[in-house]
Image (tube, rainbow, N blue to C red):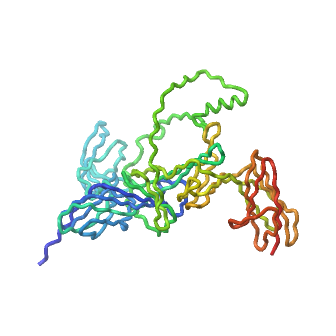
């Protein structure tokens, strides 16, 4: 005699998150540069606290509204007295295509336009097929393809969409010996996140200090927002094995046949007027034009003079945001906490403050490399402008700086003008920071051979400064194989792969250095 069947597990829905924490990891092998929402290579560890009420017995606990990039195998549920028996990701989300597939073989209501009277009519029909090739339905008149009549028509579904979730859902099977109400924590890894660091540096008029600002850009490429979340980011080179992403293989149902207009019936869009503006000056272009007109010796006639601005008392500035806490050590990685709770919105990016320091001292130097290889021709090149400082507390810094991109500006005509966009690598506390701005046309380094023998060559390196101020120039000297630098008219120091000499070149002058290289 067969025993009684086990009762089917009932569905129990957990509440929406009452507390959320998200830790975002940057895409591996990406040290900087822009990020795109449709191609995010990072991930996040999401931790949600939810309230659940579970009756006695075996039940399927549904966590609705998890991030759609969830990796189900990574999910951990803490706080359930009966533990977790199995986990499932419910990927059948509510959508027009999913509704159409769920209604196959069922009676639906079709609202369409009568081609004879032009009035809307309602008929009953049955969906026979719904795929990417189209939708076929059956009425009393026979089988038809949806939206191939050339007239407006649509469906109304009279049955519930069973098995479809409005939001991404993770379900776990659990068993409880008694009815309980508890706070449980769901922690999981989700794809489709990333972050990047962006810095701004405003060079001050003294030529020796800059004001440094740093922002963290958080990106969420999923359809679920993480509201009012405690947010952290992790910097450093995390070694992560490849994880195969879950791909929904359900094709999109395309319910269309042809456009309702012919090509010649579609009206053309009017041409949009446009005007060119200065990319740097923007709204101040008119003022800049007046200044340049005065310099050139002519002025511009204006038919309408703008009214004088009214004197309005300025509102008091808002209080500054709280400073970010110092980074924490996470193994060999660095963890940065966002000081305030924030919402990491779906399909969105936002920026939060990382650092703001004024009066950071720096040194402007010019660098170049020349190769004293045997049998080389004479050559000449421009030096590269470098801004150098140290990541120390004495220099108003002294905290780990994650890699990212810089925007360096200085005032010109009273307006901020861009002078460089270098990149910054991950920089630990105490390390040297070097920002390369680009080629310096006023500083030229020329090399020529003055003596060439089989195992002995003499080179002259001329460093010319066409500017109106004295500068510091560092020239690295490369050599090849068994050829070594035997003599130099300037002291050489080695703090890298090759030795270099440091010169102070006065304004509008040239300094020459003699080198002798020999084969050893």
In this picture, residue 189 sits left or right of residue 515: left
Q: Quadrant of residue 338?
A: bottom left
- Name the residue furthest bottom: 1
Q: Nearer the viewer, residue 97 or 503?
A: 503
- Name the residue furthest front: 394
The residue sitting at 52% across, 65% down in the picture is 237
Q: Where the C terminus falls, by quadrant?
A: bottom right
Image height of 185 relative to 505, above or below: below
Image height of 224 relative to 249, above or below: above
Q: Nearer the viewer, residue 182 or 27?
A: 182
Q: Nearer the viewer, residue 66 or 129?
A: 66
Residue 340's spot in the image, x, y percent? 41, 51
In this picture, residue 238 sits left or right of residue 1: right
In this picture, residue 518 sits left or right of residue 244: right
Residue 157's spot in the image, x, y percent? 26, 50
Residue 333's spot in the image, x, y percent? 49, 65
Image height of 517 relative to 114, above or below: below
The residue sitting at 17% across, 66% down in the picture is 178
Q: Where the N terminus falls, by quadrant?
A: bottom left
The residue sitting at 59% across, 54% down in the picture is 395
Image height of 371 relative to 507, above or below: below
Q: Nearer the viewer, residue 378 or 68?
A: 378
- Name the residue furthest left: 1
> Can residue 392 be seen in this snapshot?
yes
How many numbered marks does the figure carry?
0
């Amino acid at each position: 005699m067969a025993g009684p069947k086990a009762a089917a597990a009932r569905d129990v829905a957990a509440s929406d998150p009452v507390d959320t924490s998200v830790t975002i990891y940057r895409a591996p092998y990406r040290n900087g540069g822009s990020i795109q929402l449709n191609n995010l290579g990072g991930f996040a560890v999401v931790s949600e606290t939810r309230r659940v009420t579970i009756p006695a017995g075996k039940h399927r606990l549904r966590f609705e509204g998890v991030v759609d990039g969830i990796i189900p195998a990574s999910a951990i549920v803490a706080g359930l007295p009966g533990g977790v028996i199995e986990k499932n990701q419910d990927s059948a989300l509510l959508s027009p295509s999913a509704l159409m597939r769920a209604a196959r073989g069922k009676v639906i209501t079709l609202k369409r336009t009568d081609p004879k009277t032009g009035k809307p009519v309602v008929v009953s029909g049955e969906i026979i097929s719904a795929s990417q090739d189209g939708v076929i339905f059956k009425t009393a008149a026979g089988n038809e393809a949806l939206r191939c009549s050339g007239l407006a028509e649509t469906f109304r579904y009279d049955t519930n969409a069973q098995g479809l979730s409005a939001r991404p859902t993770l379900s776990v099977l659990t068993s409880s010996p008694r009815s309980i109400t508890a706070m449980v924590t769901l922690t999981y890894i989700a794809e489709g996140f990333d972050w990047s660091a962006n810095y701004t540096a405003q060079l001050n008029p003294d030529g020796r200090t800059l004001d440094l600002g740093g922002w963290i850009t958080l990106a969420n490429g999923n359809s679920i927002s993480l509201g009012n979340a405690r947010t952290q980011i992790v910097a450093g080179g995390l070694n992560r094995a490849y994880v195969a992403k879950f791909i929904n293989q359900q094709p999109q149902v395309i319910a269309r046949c042809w456009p309702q207009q012919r090509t010649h019936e579609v009206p053309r869009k009017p041409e949009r007027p446009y005007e060119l503006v200065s990319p740097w000056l923007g709204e101040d272009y008119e003022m800049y034009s007046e200044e340049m007109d005065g310099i050139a010796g002519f002025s511009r006639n204006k038919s309408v003079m703008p009214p004088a601005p009214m004197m309005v008392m300025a509102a008091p500035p808002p209080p500054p945001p709280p400073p970010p806490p110092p980074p924490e050590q996470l193994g060999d990685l660095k963890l940065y906490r966002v000081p305030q709770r924030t919402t990491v919105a779906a399909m969105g990016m936002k920026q939060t403050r990382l650092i703001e320091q004024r009066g950071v001292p720096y040194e402007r130097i010019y660098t170049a490399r020349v190769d004293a290889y045997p049998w080389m021709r004479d050559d000449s090149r421009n030096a590269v402008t470098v801004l150098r400082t140290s990541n120390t507390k004495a220099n108003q810094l002294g905290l780990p700086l994650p890699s990212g991109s810089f925007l360096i500006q200085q005032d010109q005509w009273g307006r901020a003008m861009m002078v460089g966009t270098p990149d910054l690598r991950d920089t630990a506390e105490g390390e040297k920071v070097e920002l390369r701005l680009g080629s310096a046309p006023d500083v030229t380094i020329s090399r020529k051979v003055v003596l060439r023998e089989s195992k002995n060559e003499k080179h002259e390196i001329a460093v010319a400064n066409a500017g109106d101020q004295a500068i510091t120039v560092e020239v690295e000297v490369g050599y090849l194989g068994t050829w070594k630098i035997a003599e130099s008219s300037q002291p050489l120091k080695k703090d890298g792969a090759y030795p270099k000499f440091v010169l102070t070149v006065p304004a509008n002058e040239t300094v020459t250095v003699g080198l002798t290289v020999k084969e050893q």
